[in-house]
Amino acid sequence: MGELRTRMDNDMIVRGRADRTRQSYLKAVERLARFYRRSPDQLSHGEVQAYLLHLIKDRKASYSTCNIAVCAFRFLYLTTLGRDRALFDIPYSKRPQRLPEIFSREEITRLLGAATNPRHHALLATTYAAGLRVGEVVKLKPADIDSTRLTIRIEQAKGAKDRYSLLSPLLLEELRGYWKQFRPRVWLFETRSGNHLDVSGAQKIYMTAKLKARITKRGGIHALRHAFATHLLEAGEDLHTIQRLMGHGDLATTSRYLHLTQAAHKSKALSRDLLKLSPAGLP
């Protein structure tokens, strides 16, 4: 499906799809082609539906895997191949209604304390204290850190939008020390080859620290973003501010954190500098 793959990828680029989204969609379509041993443009709507049933019934694929496949197939058949939307309707899976397990401030302290490598500590502290997605933190540049306005600029985040998040005084102090030690040039968290750290590398850093800290709550590095929103709410920050900081397009997405707070509207003096933890959390 070489030519078709190129066409689909170009269509996604034109429409501003993120790199990870493009890769996920293309892999899903490649699996469909391998399953039938035919090019996807030769498959009928019924065959695509049968493959999705195979994913759910036989392979017991996760909600995420099934819905990525649905999104990929919709894009391929409706956008790239121009099939009639009325004749090509495939439903999304129903999302399991699960709330994330939120780290307490004490657990964040333990997690950061377990990251003894200065680069790893700075990465995790930035992810948490600014509420960043993993794909955002690995692509930060030194120039994105504005010490005058105490903000972090996130360039072309989800939805192809720029936004600003918090740069607390404690995080600024840590990043200054980190920069003096490592002198990153292009990317804030760059590898020896000069590229930015990839997402899997950041996840590995997080999981290693989590294991060392003996934290058993489920979830990957995105749990730090959940903790950011929940802890700000508990400190008395308002939903609209948190929505803006996290880059949510819909306030309803932010509102779910109301269900996760333990003691909402504590003293607002705790707000905004989430790295005010016990000394164990600092390098």
Image (tube, rainbow, N blue to C red):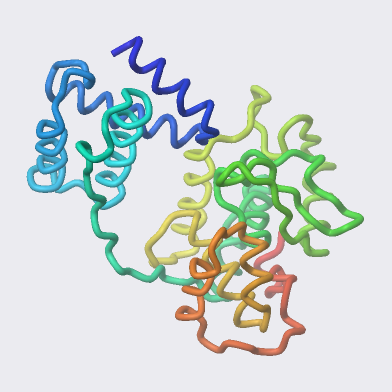
* In the displayed structure image, the side of residue 268 where residue 33 appears, left or right: left
Residue at 76% from the left image edge and 52% from the top image edge:
152
Relative height, residue 259 to residue 185 (above, below):
below
Q: Is residue 206 left or right of residue 26?
A: right
The quadrant the N terminus occupies is: top left
Query: Which x, y percent locates residue 137?
Result: 63, 46
* Quarter of the image where one finds residue 174: bottom right
Image location of residue 53, percent across then percent down: 11, 43
115 or 257, which lies in front?
A: 257
Q: Nearer the viewer, residue 115 or 27?
A: 27
Work out which quarter of the rendered image holds the C terminus and state it: bottom right
Return the x and y of residue 182 as percentages of the image width and height.
77, 37
Q: How many marks?
A: 0
Q: Looking at this rendering, what residue extends furthest in the right direction? A: 148
Left or right: 185, with 245 as reference point:
right
Residue plotted at (26% across, 52% down): 63
Is 53 or 149 nearer to us in this picture? 53
Query: Which residue reaches farthest top?
Result: 3
Query: Which of the 4 image quarters holds residue 74?
Result: top left
Q: Residue at x 64, y 27 (%)?
A: 195
Q: Residue at x 64, y 75 (%)?
A: 232
In the image, residue 191 lies at what x, y percent?
64, 30
Vertical comparison of 11 with 154: above or below: above
